[in-house]
Image: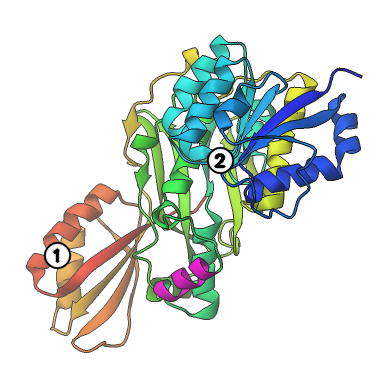
Amino acid sequence: MSQPLRLGIAGLGTVGIGTVRILQTHAALLARRAGREIRISAVSARNRGKNRDADLSAYAWEDDPIALARRGDVDVFVELIGGAEGAALDAVRAAIASGKDVVTANKAMLAHHGQALAEAAEAAGRVIRFEAAVAGGIPVVKALTEGLAGNEIRRVMGVMNGTCNYILTRMESAGLSYDAVFEEARQLGYLEADPMLDVGGIDAGHKLSLLAAIAFGTRVAFDAVQLEGIGRISIDDIRRAGDMGYRIKLLGVAQMTGRGLEQRMTPCLVPADSPLGQLQGGTNMVVIEGDAVGQIVLRGAGAGAGPTASAVLADIIDIARGSRVSTFGQPAASLAAAVPARASAPAPHYLRMALTDKPGALARVATVLGEEGISIDRMRQYGHEDSSAPVLIVTHKTTREAIDHAFARLPATGVVEGEPVAIRIETA
């Protein structure tokens, strides 16, 4: 059997300890599958004395992850620290400069620095693997870079943040407000230290930008992702969408068009009986459409110690086997700069607004929508709330630009109270 593959693991939180436990529990199985022993040489974390419920006594300890990255007895640097900047980025750079391969779960770092890191790694003959950075235990990076490499990818979409999916499905099942479920998720430890990374769509946007780079052969362009979180989604939106056969999801969509690369991570309505509509709790789902294969649906746990550590180990085993896939599926130098484009393809939309109790109020709104070329498919008016009545409209296919123009004109009608809400409906 070949020489052991020696690991340095930086970061001993949930995923780091999960990785250590798999390596300890399945050492013989992993060695058989990899064709060589996989061995931890050293580890690093901020607090050496913390109780982690794992035996780390056999491994050397480094307080500084950069020192770990430079150790002579480390072949693969496993970065599980997190964060776009700081210690994680500095240690990965040091690992590459020291001739190490890198396995990381850090989507934020790759979304902001992936191109430069990939170029540095490939120039040094090293690889960066990041299956664990996107959709937890779902092997979507491997699917795109390897399994579907013979396809021209038409579209990538999916639910990529389990916390947001938990909040939305919990609101529906328990009939609770957004604020109530947000606090529940915080108490359960589901939210990031900065909750906007989750509920603002930033975390999921990082993941989408990485998948788009692989799918369309472009440089990572996180700054071009259209982001809208779930903070404006009310329990009334969820109930009324359900009345019409839809559920609300924070949905990521990336596709290449004649105008450029569209990337959006926004709330959307999906049919309740569709695979995305039936997705519950913290589960993730990624849908990939290729010209030869058609539609592929990948579903599974999007976070947690076991699923994410599973993805880390998959990358480590590939390196142990000698697999040398480029970071984003093709040489980094060949990736094109993405031309960003806003979503322009027409789609049905859900519109929610409150109309004052005046004769002809609906007619005034319908006139504005019609003048902007927006055709109404279905409309429902609910019981009065004080002086206004909630009105829900589903349009035929139209553009967000047309809706924005119509919304800008609605205050002049004198019949719309508050700010109307528009949510795109994805039917495929």
**In x, y percent, where is residue 202?**
41, 47
Q: Is residue 129 left or right of residue 370?
A: right
Relative to 134, residue 268 above or below: below
Q: Residue visible at 58% across and 59% down?
A: 274
Of badges 1 and 2, the one in the foreground is: 2
The residue shown at (72%, 43%) is 19
For marks 1 and 2 on the same chain, the one whose residue lies earlier in the sequence: 2
Q: Position of residue 3 (x, y in %)?
A: 85, 18
Marking on residue 410: 1
Please tell me whether residue 312 is drawn above or below residue 198 in the rendered image.
Answer: above
Residue 283 appears in the rendering:
yes
Q: Residue at x 59, y 26 (%)?
A: 67
- Say whether residue 51 is left or right of residue 246: right
**Looking at this view, is 216 or 304 the one in front?**
304
Drawn side of residue 119 relative to residue 56, left or right? left
- How packed mark 2 is, by other alpha carbons closer than 10 Å (few <14, some 14-19, many 20 or more), is many
Q: Amino acid at mark 2?
A: Ile
* Residue 246 circle label: none
**Is any atom of residue 298 visible in this view?**
no
Q: In the rendered structure, does residue 59 fall within the stretch colored magenta? A: no
How crowded is the residue under tag 1: few (<14 C-alpha within 10 Å), some, or many (20+)?
some
Q: Main secondary structure of the magenta part?
A: helix
Magenta span of residues: 179-187
Q: CA distance from mark 1 to mark 2?
A: 48 Å
Find numbered disc 1 in the image and state the secondary structure of the residue it sits on: helix
Q: Answer whether residue 180 is magenta in the image.
A: yes
Q: Position of residue 71 (x, y in %)?
A: 66, 22
In the figure, residue 178 lies in which quadrant? bottom left
Q: How is the image coloured?
A: rainbow
Residue type at the position of mark 1: Leu
Numbered label attached to residue 81: 2
Total numbered labels placed on residues in the image: 2
